[in-house]
Amino acid sequence: MKEIREILLFCIMRPVSLASLILGLAFINPVLPPLMEAGEFTIRYIDIGTVLLIWFVFRKFYIQKNSFFKHKWWIIFRPLAPFFIYTGLSIGLVRVYAPDVVWTSVASYARLMVTILTGWLIYMSIEKESDLKFIVKSIVAFAAISIIFGIWQAFSGPLERIWIDRYGGFLGINNFGLISGLLIVWSVIGFIYKITPLFSIILMLIGLFGLLLSKSATSTSAAVITILFLGTVVVRTKFSKNMQIVILTSALIAGIGFLIGALWMIRRSDLIGLLTLSGGSWVQRLMLAYAALQIFFSHPLGVGWQASKTKAILGDPNLNKTLMEAFPKVHREYYFFLDQQLSLHNMYLQILAELGIVGFLSFIYGITRIVKMSINLINKISAKPRLKAYAMSCAISLIYLLIWWNSRVLFGGHIESILAVSFLSIIAIIYQFEDQNKV
């Protein structure tokens, strides 16, 4: 009995097991109550796992005595360092334009930095390829379980409501669609790399069901565009240039047709409202995008991290008047975001409005550099097909997230942010394994 307890304790307290626990808690974070709140700062269950993993990782870091700046993780994340530094400095702008929410901005930035730290902890917890396999399978398992729960929740109610309502399980509607789209993308990658075809089919079906139930236009669009991008990568390696043009043109036309048909089926009223600029959820997003540009034109250097959603910025009467003039057909009820705090609902426009031209360009620079490094890494991997499949999965998943983020802002602690740093960290550890294989 004592030996069994010791084995269980060893398995639970392994760094990679704690990393998996953190990922699992990230998925159920929306339904877990906070452990403690101190003003704008919140301590959650996921923070307990993070603290435990910090102890193990820093102990390993101290024993190995390796320079942090030689780690592949730092090489991958380094291009984003100027962006994160400028984000922290922008809190000074919050004191100028929206002093009432300074501590909200500080708390949000602190959570963002903890999320980045989580990525490094995951990287440091992976010591061998079996650990990498465990982390990858954990992410897929947590994603599939989350969507299955949401599907069960939907079908446990009246069946006639399924085609009317939108479902989100414990993830919430936005993240439910996000994960459903990711499952579809992963299943396509599974088919390409011939990784358990039956499992890929199951993932595809779960993802399609989830996407249909969430009725998420953003996730549907991101999934279609990402699959078209993935198809482009595959076609370029297997066909002549003339055949590439024919296949890609046909795929593009089919993809656009499928996307329009899907959006018409799941969100018809919103699509009509957008086309006529008369109302609906998508018109609201268009108005928020227009508002973000107006904020940027008025504050080229930004208004500071998380300050755009305040009454002083988004609720400004002059901005209200400008929006009314630009969208005269939209009823007043669709301007609810002027009366209450609401994010700009678009990561890129939020960065532009809150961090200005400096923050926006530093972010684009960082993303571009990371994409180039990821492509170079995938092209170099040849000895182990599974490593290449993992690297491709993470890289394509990041592409998916970058497309999906047109409808969601960058927050720390949210599942999409945790997934983003996890994918980058997995790419970094594969980078490290590839170098070790060459020695």
Image: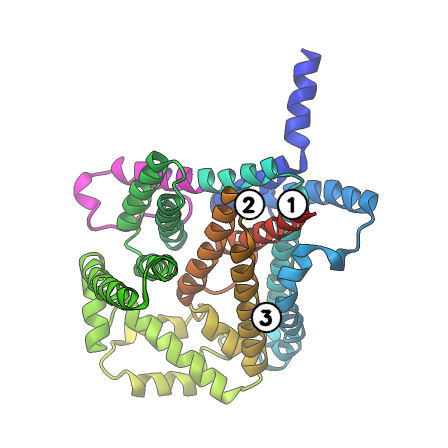
Label 1: how many residues lie within 10 Å, few (<14), some (14-19) or many (20+)?
few
Q: Secondary structure at mark 2?
A: loop
Horizontally, residue 126 falls left or right of residue 277, namely right
Q: Quadrant of residue 265?
A: bottom left
For residue 101, the mark is 3
- Residue that appears at 49% across and 84% down: 296
* Residue labelled with disc 1: 437
Residue hosting label 2:
383
Rendering quarter of residue 200: top left
Mark 3 or 1, closer to the camera? 1
Camera-near label (3 vs 2) is: 2
User: Which region shows up in magenta?
Assistant: 143-171
Q: Which of the two residues, 318 or 290, is positioned nearer the viewer here? A: 290
| Of the image marks 3 and 1, the number of the one nearer the N terminus | 3
Q: Residue at x 51, y 61 (%)?
A: 375
- Give the percent coordinates (x, y) of residue 202: 32, 37
Whether label 2 touches label 1, CB < 8 Å: yes
